Image (tube, coloured by chain):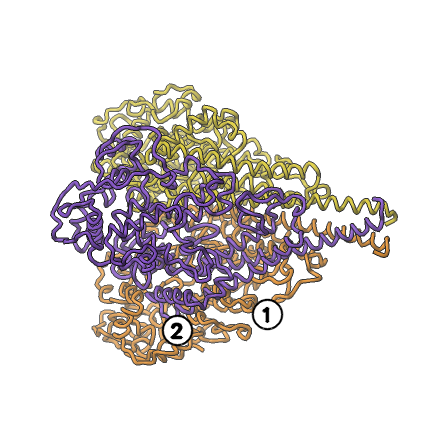
Chain colours: A purple, B yellow, C orange
Amino acid sequence: MRNGSGLRGWRAIAAVAAASIGLGGGAALGEGWPTVPEETFAALGVAADAPANVLYEALAARFYDQAKGYGEGQFSALWEPIAFSRYLNPALYEGREELGFQVTAEECVTCHETVTPGWVHAASRSVHADLAALRSLPADDPRAYKVAHLDEVEANLRSMGLLDAGEALAEVGCIDCHMGVGVTEGNHKTDLRLPDAAVCGQCHVRQFAERESERDTQTWPQEQWPAGRPSHALSMLANYETAIWAGMAEREVAEGCTMCHTTQVTCNQCHTRHEFSAAQARRPEMCANCHNGVDHNEFENYMMSRHGLIYQTNGDRWDWEAPLSEAFAAAGYNAPTCQTCHMSVNGEYSHNLVQKVRWGFNPMPSIAENLDHSWFQERKDLWVATCTQCHSPSFATSYLDMLDKGTVQGIGLVQQADAVVKGLYADGLLIGQAANRPAPPAPDADAAGGFFGLFWTAGNNPTAVEHEYAQMWEQELMRHFKGLAHVNPGGFTYSYGWSELIGSLARIRDEDTRLREARALVERVEALEKAGGGN
Amino acid sequence: MRNGSGLRGWRAIAAVAAASIGLGGGAALGEGWPTVPEETFAALGVAADAPANVLYEALAARFYDQAKGYGEGQFSALWEPIAFSRYLNPALYEGREELGFQVTAEECVTCHETVTPGWVHAASRSVHADLAALRSLPADDPRAYKVAHLDEVEANLRSMGLLDAGEALAEVGCIDCHMGVGVTEGNHKTDLRLPDAAVCGQCHVRQFAERESERDTQTWPQEQWPAGRPSHALSMLANYETAIWAGMAEREVAEGCTMCHTTQVTCNQCHTRHEFSAAQARRPEMCANCHNGVDHNEFENYMMSRHGLIYQTNGDRWDWEAPLSEAFAAAGYNAPTCQTCHMSVNGEYSHNLVQKVRWGFNPMPSIAENLDHSWFQERKDLWVATCTQCHSPSFATSYLDMLDKGTVQGIGLVQQADAVVKGLYADGLLIGQAANRPAPPAPDADAAGGFFGLFWTAGNNPTAVEHEYAQMWEQELMRHFKGLAHVNPGGFTYSYGWSELIGSLARIRDEDTRLREARALVERVEALEKAGGGN
Amino acid sequence: MRNGSGLRGWRAIAAVAAASIGLGGGAALGEGWPTVPEETFAALGVAADAPANVLYEALAARFYDQAKGYGEGQFSALWEPIAFSRYLNPALYEGREELGFQVTAEECVTCHETVTPGWVHAASRSVHADLAALRSLPADDPRAYKVAHLDEVEANLRSMGLLDAGEALAEVGCIDCHMGVGVTEGNHKTDLRLPDAAVCGQCHVRQFAERESERDTQTWPQEQWPAGRPSHALSMLANYETAIWAGMAEREVAEGCTMCHTTQVTCNQCHTRHEFSAAQARRPEMCANCHNGVDHNEFENYMMSRHGLIYQTNGDRWDWEAPLSEAFAAAGYNAPTCQTCHMSVNGEYSHNLVQKVRWGFNPMPSIAENLDHSWFQERKDLWVATCTQCHSPSFATSYLDMLDKGTVQGIGLVQQADAVVKGLYADGLLIGQAANRPAPPAPDADAAGGFFGLFWTAGNNPTAVEHEYAQMWEQELMRHFKGLAHVNPGGFTYSYGWSELIGSLARIRDEDTRLREARALVERVEALEKAGGGN
């Protein structure tokens, strides 16, 4: 369903000699792709020093492959997109229905200055708008590192035949992203596209490869999660294939979920339109776009941790324009951000954010029981390396141990509740279980305390005790773990996490006893009725 | 009860020739009042190009009219102000009980520099403190637009006979607001007043007219709300006439409500004392003074929306001194604020913030059923115009549709719960309903799941299930709508809104089944007792 | 168990004539200790003008006295530290187990630049790193007041024989804090220590005395709290002697509590490593390290109060480098911070933050009933003095009255619930009370609605209704009071506090009626069974 516009050649407004850069069409700047994990080359069947065009084509082909997660997923027959859905996923964007006139690159700007001025104002402040200004940055400017990025982009485009050897880019205009790189004019109805990550990736091949590599490094040794998940790179698939999402009738509410799951398909969850500021993407608040709330309150935990509070008090003096590799040195950070910890592996930064994931999005027994497996141990070692930028190894190790054990303790509470709720279900004792328990909509199926019960209800499904239990395993345990992981004491002791789990378990046991006592009393009355006859 | 001090003539410390301004006593700068809606002129019976003094007198007369909302409202016999109440409403301020000495304008400063230095320090940093400095701003200063504001203020005062043609204002001192414009001395006990909005409005006639116009444009076609409400302009009346507010015995707790409802009577909820900074009033946090919390969490939703997160990461680079009309251009905003959306109508900014209100403060069936009425459609079109500053019309329209439908879906859950709770009440099945259900204090009356139950309890009123239902309709549904309206996905899917409503509805149904089963069992026991006799 | 390293003499890298300072070993700069309360001198048995070395030795002796709160408290036999515990309390730190080589002061830096670069980068930005730069600050620099602090530090060290009369400090290096003041080399295993407050206090005697004085001024006239508590100065003892903390099996979760209770033993909860920035410590967010969450949400209340919202909008223009005494004048604050209110007594600032405490951490009847006692009245007067920096005395007094009465109203709701829950317990009616109610772990003992039930559960202890009640008295009432105390209307009306208490009380009464009706029905069935025989 996506707009079929392909590559159209690059618009090189300024042609300057690029001899001093001296790059052919090979690997980016002749260095291979050191920040792209080897798993990705293996998965793509591409050499680790493949030229940019070869790497890009392989990545884009997989990106657009419906068998590998593109499109609407296995439950697509069960739901219909709403009008707004097309803005959340370029795969659903079929082009405009109107305005079928021809426009030039210049007309984009002149017309939209009036029609949607916010776009033009924001874009005019972006690096894209004036690459000559970027090239002229003095070497001591914190943004000077971007000159090498630009060289790399130009090398990428040359490898694709989209830029001549003697050409240099002058700017990236609306049309380059919205109609095709280098396009000078097109039809406003049929040629227009919503840019997706593969559009960004054509210039930014390395970054595209890094982000796509999440599919390849997220390999759970005991299959705790599906291959490549949870990750940003397959987040939209995860959304579409969540049973209750696909099954629920209220598509407008469901699209709220989709609004965060766009990281698979676009880059602008973090690099917001139309400034695409890297400095902005380094701020913890950008992660909060998605990582907040009842079942993954990473942002709240970070902000209330010592780390986050130092950010809140000192962050205005840190140099956000500097690259992450300078964070604790020239940029002056004296506390980590989401980005410094989650984008780094052994001091190397990339757009693969899941290479140190251990507990994932939901602490579960199958992880707890395998923490001594090498996959988990090696990732723990990577965390120690991260923490020891600012903490001693013994400090880091002891805290990571505390994190693991505290998480396991939380799982223990959930398992106790699980046994109670499943016992009530097995015994047919849940309120209304016999008389009034409709099944959730397909593709979901009934289950005691299932995830569906947080978003759907009918009759006595879910019961109150099941809803409580669903909150335990899906929200309170998550908050407990996330509080531990982000070193926010209140997040795993009394405000969230542990104390919440205790309260829920107490209420679930209360209800268990009450329901069983109520059943016993009913049986006594039945016995009386049988004995007494005639009533 | 309010202090009776009237107008006392203007203190013109510096008298300079104002010939270059060339304004007579007519309409502000001869341009009429383009930002004041025509409904207001109609309501006041004043011409749309009335001179400032005429417009002001009509506005002030209405402002002080008890028949139109001034004072303590229809339930005033039921409650007594506490000592602190006088600081929340100048209408309750009867003057000081002590310190009855004469003071001069200069003595305000010299004495309070010692007594309450915070006042003096803050005031000294305000624009009021040095109008000459304002006049000398270079034309390219972002605050230069205020010079025209000052001209307008002087024209207003001339129209009232409070400033001579040849005079210019030099400063606004304590005494001008606290005893009367232009007053040079007065009695510290009998002449002192707490300034209200009509005091500010004497200089700032246009802004006063804009804010007062909320009474006139908030006209619900199916009378979903009382005329002119909800609005800032009648917010204190709404407070005083809320039944449980008037009836509850705990006046100190009740005054917490009043603390936000002062926008009817003063301007300093947004323009805080004594800097009265417009730059500050442009910040979203100023709206959070009131617009936060369980039943109107606009601030939380904004801050966690993409819009708010961009504000949080980029806002320190935006020029807050620039007027809102420059927000997306010279001031560099690349996301909206509360102010840019809610203070604008078709690109024109004013202090009437309710001209695009559609769902108001509580989504209800009577709105849902009338969304195709022209009143709602026209306001939706105004929203599309607002959004299309930065989004395409189809994007804006499709999201506004999603907002409406998602809100209607939330209302559906509340209606299901409503039927259950009212059914239990009708059937006399609520816990303790027969034996121990005191009525709420007058002027309130008993009702199943009434608003009063969020603030008052006695005996078994409210029951747990009613309290849950009151939270649904008054808080969860509001959060659901506000999450949708402020484009915060977690606010209407899983953290707040929908998922909360689902949980509440499930618990309410659980209780419904439990109570009905309990009643059936009691009846079976009664039958056994009757059959068995003698026990 | 703590590291035994004592004082080792001072490292004076630069020796310059200090004749112009002209201080001997006597009291700091010859002025005595005006910011240290007289209670402390009385408690220590030291003269109010004692020399720095005498005062310091007395303070340090008490600080390290296990009979006065040092160490692991009376329940230490019941719990074991985990590996991470040593980083929370230097008293538990027994030295490293490895790396037993000799290191010089210079080697700290050269090695840790590689091993833990964050430490070195942060320390290099601290005032400690370059005292010459501090001395050369121009008099109009907001930090110039620190030159006198440095003079004071040097005088302190001279009084202890750690600095010669002709010497001046050039820097404070890693080794000075981690091995001993003035040490030039040591063993990395046996000499290394985690600095505690007494290490900081050796140079900063006055500040150490101020913080330690909290033990002496927190003297409750009706013994509402143990002597000296609640306070920062005995916070670790309070942690270790909380029964459920000591008794619970999950030590990793328990250590989350400890993470905030470190203020007794170190200074770096507020003065964060390794910049130790005073400017940072003046920010409200630093208090949020601990003062947030379900049972002491001071930070949330402040930030949502008018005070905090002004901070959020204007704070970036305030001069955080200026001392607190300049806050409302030169530093430009136009709203208070945590620090300006809680660190000041009659305009004098110190590190004793509890001299105006009245309601403490848990509003209770024994405080409510004694508010007219002189101890409470005098502290209220001190609050009036604080508020009148920016508010009139009548405003301040009337609000403080509202605060007290509103708090008493909240206590009233808790007392009603208390009677219900204790009545159910006394009557043996709590769910599972007879059959399945294990006691909490020692040293705790069973009680209806005890604090333990927020962190521990087994069988039917606590029941749901008890958990609700524990939340009422320990969390909701606290939030209610803290909302009032920090002038956040939503914090004590509808979002937190009052409305929460109403909901909990309603649910508790609901359950009371339900349980009593259930018992009555059981009795009726029992009577039928007895009458019917044979079943």
Question: Which chain is mark 1 on?
Answer: C
Image quadrant for the N terminus of chain A? top left
Question: Which chain is mark 2 on?
Answer: C
Residue to which mark 1 is pinned: C443
Nearest the viewer among C243 and B118 is C243
Tell me which amino acid carries mark 2.
Leu
Vertical comparison of B289 with C350: above or below:
above
Identify the disc placed on residue C55. Answer: 2
Vertical comparison of B148 with C50: above or below:
above
Assign a secondary structure to mark 2: helix
- Percent across and percent down for residue C414 are 61, 53
In the displayed structure, does residue A364 sit left or right of residue A29?
right
Image quadrant for the C terminus of chain A? top right
Nearest the viewer among B340 and C484 is B340
Nearest the viewer among A411 and A37 is A37
**Is residue B476 in sight in this rendering?**
yes
Identify the disc placed on residue A110. Answer: none
- Percent across and percent down for residue C455 are 56, 61
In the displayed structure, does residue B466 sit left or right of residue A22?
right
Nearest the viewer among C141 and C296 is C296
What's the distance in space between the residues labelled 2 and 1, CA to CA?
A: 37 Å
- Percent across and percent down for residue A431 are 66, 48
Label 2 vs label 1, nearer the camera: 1
Outermost residue, front side: A45
Assign a secondary structure to mark 1: loop
- Residue located 62% across and 36% down the image: B419
In the displayed structure, does residue A305 sit left or right of residue B471?
left
Instruction: Looking at the image, tell me whether mark 2 or mark 1 is earlier in sequence order.
Output: 2
Tell me which amino acid carries mark 1.
Pro
**Is residue B111 in sight in this rendering?**
no
